[in-house]
Image (tube, rainbow, N blue to C red):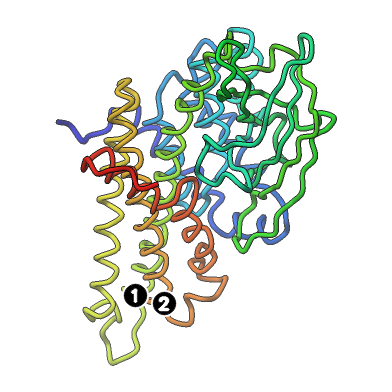
Amino acid sequence: MNFDLTPEQDQLRDAVRALGRRYGHDYFVRKAKAGEHTTELWHEAGRLGYLGVNIPTEYGGGGGGITELALVCEELAAAGCPLLLLVVSPAIAATVITKHGTEEQRKKHLPGLADGSQKIVFAITEPDAGSNFHRLGTVARRDGDDWLLSGRKVYISGVDEADHVLVVARTEDSATGKLKPALFIVPTDAPGLEKSKLDMEILSPENQFLLYLDDVRLPADALVGESLDAGLPALFAGLNPERITVAAMGAGTGRYAIEKASDYTATRKVWGGRSIGSHQGVAHPLAHAAVQVELARLMIQKAAALYDAGRDLEAGVSGNMAKYAAGEAAALAVDTAVQALGGAGMTTEYGVATLLGAVRAGRIAPVSREMILNFVAQHVLGQDKSY
């Protein structure tokens, strides 16, 4: 068992850390408050090859795996620049297209995803279905050689920045008549596709949208894969990378908050000549949060290694556990940092309260902590399904 990164992974981590710190949390907050996107950081990360580390080299990527992409997600977050679209574009969309797309789809989309010139976002969640994709109401039906998509999607990140959206719909199996999932690559300017921005209490440069699909007409080659049989495996191919990279982003955010608080408490003096960090009432909560973040990082590393080794079932368990652990640890770390800084913790200047909304959302999305506990109870502990 080896917990050391390879020399190449070490170099990647150091390089991404340097890039993130060059932009920093002030840049992130400034963009978010201005209603702008982190376009400069995204394009530079793409130009340097960091967005495509998990994409095969023949399509312009780095040839690595989710382990490498998780490093990118964590280090940018640890620099105060957590980029949500790393999860939906390189982690989900690129993985789905690499593993289950046609060769034409790979050639068309992967090079742009690798260099950052193209973004593909992901649309699965619906207003009435919640976490239950078996109840999806978005339906795709045949019309000659074309497809027509109709339905609604909600909490879809970054639609205003993306060229395409990867939509999960349901189609009718001609043999059984039953509905089965399928994925479609839909241009964001397609006729019949409308978006409505959601107002969120989260400080983020990435926006959330409600999507309406009203008989959106798509050519046959918009279907991911060679046939409808690719739908279910393609869907699951994207979910484990999603959980792992979201967890990595959470762990990086936790590291950022603890570093900010530790720097402050080590130098802040109120009672005599001792720093406030010398008092256990301040130091112990920070130490506890640091332990939780480090434990989450270990599970992220395990989950990514299992996924990259092709051990999907085990990666599913570890990925869910990593997402749960990192969500809890990030929320704890940011809250603890705010408390340690006192009034300063609530100011924009000190850069920790600006992350409260994001880390709270990390306990809900992309899968809630309660659904993860249901999963672990059923698949690890052998309990009956409760829902």
For the residues labelled 1 and 2, the Cα–Cα distance comes to 7 Å
Please state which amino acid type lies under the numbered disc 1. Thr
Q: Residues within 10 Å of mark 2 (few under 14, many from 20)?
A: many
Q: Is residue 7 left or right of residue 65?
A: left
Q: Is residue 123 left or right of residue 235?
A: right
**Front label number (1 vs 2):** 2
Q: Residue furthest front?
A: 176
Judge by depth and name the residue closer to the eye, 348 or 297.
Answer: 297
Q: Is residue 381 left or right of residue 296?
A: left
Dot 1: what SS? helix
Q: Is residue 74 above or below residue 275?
A: above
Judge by depth and name the residue closer to the eye, 271 or 214.
Answer: 214
- Dividing the picture into quadrants, the one containing residue 222 is top right
Q: Is residue 27 above or below residue 176?
A: below
Residue 273 visible in the shown view: yes
Q: Which residue is mark 2?
A: 341
Tags 1 and 2 touching, CB below 8 Å:
yes
Q: Residue at x 55, y 71 (%)?
A: 349
Residue 7 visible in the shown view: no
Judge by depth and name the residue closer to the eye, 337 or 233.
Answer: 233
Q: Which residue is mark 1?
A: 265
Q: Closer to the N terminus: mark 1 or mark 2?
A: 1
Query: Residue 326 placed where, x, y %?
Result: 36, 51
Q: Residues within 10 Å of mark 1 (few under 14, many from 20)?
A: many
Q: Quadrant of the N terminus?
A: top left
Q: Residue furthest bottom?
A: 272
Query: Residue 67 placed where, x, y %?
Result: 36, 31
Q: Residue at x 50, y 57 (%)?
A: 361
